[in-house]
Image (cartoon, rainbow, N blue to C red):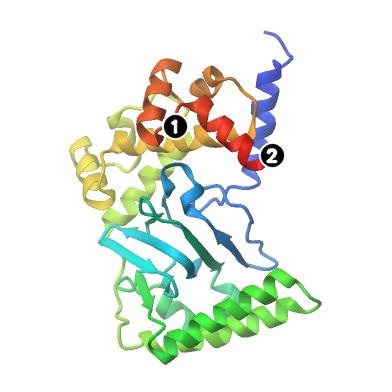
Amino acid sequence: MNQELSAGGRELSAYADDIKNRINSSTLEETVQCITAEFPYMTNLCTLHTLPGRTFPWHWHNEAELFYLRSGVLDYVLPGGIHTFHKGEGGFINAGVLHLTRCPPGASCLQEEHIFHPSFLGGQEPSILLSRYITPLIRHSGLDLYRFDPSFPLHQKIISLMKEAYGCYTRKEEGYEFDVREIMTRLWRILFSLTKDLRIEEKRTPRNDRIKTMMEYVASHYQETISLNDIAGSAFISSRECSRCFQETLGLSPFAYLTDYRLRKACSLLKHTSLSVTDVSAACGFNSSSYFGQTFREAFGYTPRQYRLRQTEETS
């Protein structure tokens, strides 16, 4: 066996190593910036209308998420329904909640997001801050999403604090870490007071855990030939229950989810490497480049080559 990688193989290997450093192990999705154990908080601006399909796919993370819509329209799609946000509005997505974000056709959006681990505010166990003020909200199964309406004074205060934290984080002046943590602590105190009457002691449904397990299986094996039984077996359920779980939770079949996941990975390879379309197709688990091209065009409205050209023009 040849000990040397081909040029394409070396490029794919280097890309894979780079991606490992930019993939959140909880979300299984690529991120621009990573949360670190030293400072488990990040904020950035998102323009979902520039992503393939104007969508960031189904994912979850162990961190809490706060967001504010600076402009446009944005949908947060949860298993329980669709929540549409407009300019000036914001919200809270709890840790571990499955969600998809998308920008509706014909609209654009600029979203400011803040993602942080509970330890950022409450420290490590044992901690009275965690046990009394952080964990009860994070583990509340009925509090998946909370909307901030700027017409309510306390909601507007939370949005203002988000803006203040964003400014501190992006300027990165000396001591900004203290300032961001202090601002987010004030924000959390308000959110805690707003939600205290909603909290109940429950656990998330087994179906939610099953879908996450199967999504993780897809993320680990999407380059291989995967059957419905393989996906179902990862969660120790029948193929019928697997299909029902995907349909009722995500609104699509297991294979539709697998295809979408492969297409998203293909977009990353097309954007970040110079691998041929054929090599990208094979690397993402498609049986043939012609089927890959057809599926890609049906999903995004342009061919893989056209997508690569668009990405090159946008970054040049």
Q: Position of residue 117 (x, y in %)?
A: 55, 68
* 167 on left or right of 250: right
Image quadrant in which the C terminus is located: top right
Q: Amino acid at mark 1?
A: Tyr
Query: What SS does tag 2 mark?
Result: loop
Q: Position of residue 124 (x, y in %)?
A: 60, 75
Decide if residue 76 is in sight here.
yes
Image quadrant in which the N terminus is located: top right
* 185 on left or right of 144: right
Please tell me which residue is depicted at 31% across the width and 88% down the height of the picture.
197
Please tell me which residue is depicted at 42% across the width and 38% down the height of the picture.
261
Q: Position of residue 310 (x, y in %)?
A: 56, 35
**Total tally of numbered discs in the picture:** 2
The mark that comes first in sequence, 2 or 1, is 1
Q: Work out whether 316 lies above or below 157.
A: above
Please tell me which residue is depicted at 36% across the width and 50% down the height of the picture.
105
Q: Work out whether 141 lies above or below 265.
A: below
Query: What SS does tag 1 mark?
Result: loop
Q: Which residue is mark 1?
A: 222
Crowding around mark 1 (Cα neighbors within 10 Å: few <14, some 14 to 19, many 20+) is some
Crowding around mark 2 (Cα neighbors within 10 Å: few <14, some 14 to 19, many 20+) is few
Q: Which residue is mark 2?
A: 316
Q: Position of residue 184 (x, y in %)?
A: 58, 81
The answer to whether marks 2 and 1 mark residues whose Cβ atoms lie closer than 8 Å is: no
